[in-house]
Amino acid sequence: MDEIWERAVETALNEQKDYAATRTLTLDGSVKVVPGRLPLLSLLEKFENLQYLSMANNRVPSLEHFSRLRDLHKLILSDNRIECNKRQSIPLSKRNPGQTKSRA
């Protein structure tokens, strides 16, 4: 199953190999063969600068692993089967993309 996620990522990136430079990744409907399987954490961690991730319609079961994407500003998980409790959340970046640092 993990190989399927890896192939889906490679296809989405058009064979680009520099995962760290990738800021946008769309995997909508890419992997639906086994319900409830997230991509490996080691695969997600390759995207050090990812800001936009869409994984709509992939039968994603939880929010696990997504908090590891430190620069993520937008996460789209529509049409999935996410089960979460009231305490579960994803701390997305609090930084506003248009915000500049003030100088003291």
Image (cartoon, rainbow, N blue to C red):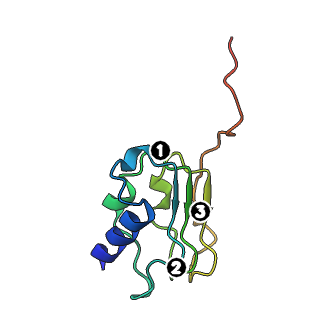
Question: What kind of residue is marked 3?
Answer: Ser
Q: Which mark is residue 89?
A: 3
Q: How far across and how far down the image is residue 24, in percent?
A: 53, 54
Q: Give the quadrant of the C terminus.
A: top right
- The residue at which mark 2 appears reads as 29
Disc 2/disc 3 C-alpha distance (Å):
23 Å
Q: Is residue 47 above or below residue 34?
A: above
Task: Pick whichever, 62 or 72, lies toward us.
Answer: 72
Which mark's residue is nearer the viewer, 2 or 1?
Answer: 2
Residue at the far left in the pictured view: 3
User: Could you say which quadrant of the image residue 88 lies in?
Assistant: bottom right
Question: What kind of residue is marked 2?
Answer: Gly
Which residue is at a point 39% across and 45% down the rendered structure image?
20
Answer with left or right where residue 87 lies relative to residue 11. right
Task: Pick whichever, 88 or 37, lies toward us.
Answer: 37
Q: Secondary structure at mark 1?
A: loop
Query: Along the polypeptide, which appears first: circle 2 or circle 3?
Result: 2
Task: Pick whichever, 20 or 82, lies toward us.
Answer: 20
Answer with left or right where residue 97 lies relative to residue 42. right
| Label 2 close to label 3 by CB (< 8 Å) | no
| Label 1 close to label 3 by CB (< 8 Å) | no
